[in-house]
Image: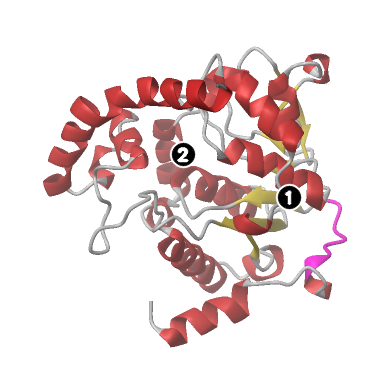
């Protein structure tokens, strides 16, 4: 990314915590974790173009992930296209609120809850620092784009209840009846508007609504290779498994097969061994 583009992104998207723009008094504004990926972008499009609700997007920047710059550039490009092509979006889409993962203090209670959940089902490290971030920022209803075929969706499927968000659409939350469970500790801050649909359903709805061009701008790979998806990271594998193989270049799909055949089966025993070492 060139310096001019980076400067534009910083000035347009980064909002300091003490800025007047940071404080949004609109009671109908919907906070969304937006990564520039398929699921969160679909929800942003729904909110802006279908429900015409104000959207406050959040991005948590992980300096260790190679895809960060691409994700931010993707968010910028989609935001620019929406504002250019839909005049009403200019007043609804708030500036992106960026935070560094490295600045989020560790929360021992969240880390313990994650360890307990992992005894039954493996979920990523982000599910310790995401709720810690929400707790620190006093966010108690930020939208997380968990969907059908997602590990977290399977984990929480028996614990959620539905509700009407902003009087416009159905969403889900972990029910307070499960307040004694570690899952509640980790996911109580979030709502899940995509909990009952999968990526194919999103693709179909986007096509019906005329949003396909925006969806094709989204990004998902964690380790970009020459500006294209690598084919060997977990999101590339998931894209193929969830019926979205067209998103991975044909010449990279052989790497996906190798990753699934040889590397992926080694992950569970390695995680178990590491967990045992940490406890000893």
Q: Residue at x 61, y 20 (%)?
A: 117
Please, is residue 173 above or below residue 22 in the view? above
Pick the residue in front: 87 or 37. Answer: 37
The residue lying furthest to the bottom in this view is 4
Q: Which residues are magenta?
A: 22-28
- Horizontally, is 135 left or right of 152 in the view? right
Contact (CB < 8 A) between labels 2 and 1? no
Whole-percent x, y for residue 197 in the image: 51, 28
Q: Which label belongs to residue 111?
A: none
Whole-percent x, y for residue 217 in the image: 38, 58
Q: Residue at x 33, y 37 (%)?
A: 239
Task: Give the Cα separation between the discs numbered 2 and 1.
Answer: 21 Å
User: In the rendered image, which residue does mark 1 sit on?
Assistant: 30
Residue depth check, mark 2 versus mark 1: number of the one nearer the observer: 1
Dominant secondary-structure state across the stretch colored magenta = loop
Q: Is residue 96 magenta?
A: no
Q: Residue at x 75, y 28 (%)?
A: 185
Whole-percent x, y for residue 96 in the image: 64, 65
Helix, strand or loop status at disc 1: strand
Please, is residue 185 above or below residue 208 in the view? above
Please, is residue 242 above or below residue 50 in the view? above
User: In the rendered image, which residue does mark 2 sit on?
Assistant: 205
Helix, strand or loop status at disc 2: helix
The residue lying furthest to the front in this view is 280
């Amino acid at each position: 990314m060139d310096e001019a583009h980076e400067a534009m992104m910083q000035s347009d998207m980064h909002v300091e915590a003490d800025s007047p723009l940071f404080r949004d008094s609109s009671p109908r504004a919907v906070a969304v974790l937006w990564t520039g990926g398929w699921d969160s972008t679909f929800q942003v499009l729904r909110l802006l173009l279908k429900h015409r609700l104000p959207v406050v997007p959040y991005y948590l920047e992980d300096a260790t992930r190679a895809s960060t710059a691409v994700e931010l550039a993707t968010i910028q490009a989609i935001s620019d296209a929406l504002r250019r092509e839909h005049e009403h979006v200019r007043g609804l889409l708030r500036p992106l609120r960026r935070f560094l993962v490295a600045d989020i203090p560790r929360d021992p209670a969240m880390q313990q809850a994650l360890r307990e959940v992992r005894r039954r089902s493996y979920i990523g490290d982000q599910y310790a620092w995401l709720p810690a971030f929400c707790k620190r920022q006093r966010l108690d209803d930020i939208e997380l784009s968990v969907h059908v075929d997602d590990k977290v969706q399977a984990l929480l499927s028996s614990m959620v209840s539905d509700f009407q968000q902003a009087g416009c659409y159905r969403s889900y939350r972990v029910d307070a009846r499960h307040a004694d469970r570690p899952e509640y500790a980790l996911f109580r801050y979030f709502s899940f508007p995509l909990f009952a649909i999968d990526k194919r359903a999103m693709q179909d709805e986007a096509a019906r609504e005329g949003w396909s061009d925006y969806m094709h701008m989204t990004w998902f790979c964690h380790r970009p290779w020459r500006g294209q998806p690598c084919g060997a990271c977990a999101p590339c594998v998931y894209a193929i498994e969830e019926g979205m193989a067209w998103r991975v270049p044909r010449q990279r799909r052989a790497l996906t097969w190798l990753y699934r055949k040889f590397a992926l089966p080694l992950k569970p025993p390695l995680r178990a061994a590491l967990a045992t070492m940490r406890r000893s």
